[in-house]
Image: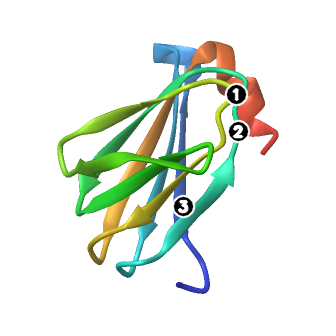
Amino acid sequence: MADEIVEVIHDCTEWCGIYIRSIILEKAGDCESQHVHQFDHLTYCGSGSAQYWEDGRHVGAVKAGGAVRVRAGKEHSFTALEDNTRLACIHDAASAAEQRML
């Protein structure tokens, strides 16, 4: 696994009501660790592909241009299937305050 995940935050809540957390998993096999949110959100795959896990159960894969719904209260994680996989978690304004505290 890479030493550090490349992460970018786009806080657009004031003008369009969304908050985006974008990460790059640099190498195939790199993981975004399991975590839980209080609100549903969308994770968009901008490049590469990744396996998606929810509550320890494999849900499926997401490819570049695709997205998955991440349900509130569910522990979730992603594992890159390709080098330089970019994932962008898109949250609405209601969950933005929770995201700023992570």
* Mark 1: secondary structure: loop
- Tag 2, which secondary structure? loop
Mark 3 sits on what residue?
A: 7
Disc 1 from disc 3: Cα separation:
23 Å
Q: Which sits in the foreground, 15 or 1? A: 1
Residue 89 vertical placement versus 2 (above, below)? above
Given the image, on which type of amino acid does mark 1 rest? Gly
Amino acid, disc 2: Val
Quick one: label 3 or label 2, which is nearer the N terminus? 3
Q: Badge 3: how crowded within 10 Å, few (<14), some, or many (20+)?
A: few
- Secondary structure under badge 3? strand
| Direction front: furthest residue | 57
Which circle's residue, 1 or 3, is located before the other in the chain? 3
Q: Quadrant of the C terminus?
A: top right
Determine whether 73 is above or below 64 in the image.
above
Disc 2 target residue: 36
Q: What residue do we see at 33% from left, 59% from top?
A: 50
Q: For mark 1, what is the residue?
A: 73
The amino acid type of the residue labelled 3 equals Glu
The image quarter containing residue 74 is top right
* Residue 47, x across and y down, in percent: 23, 58
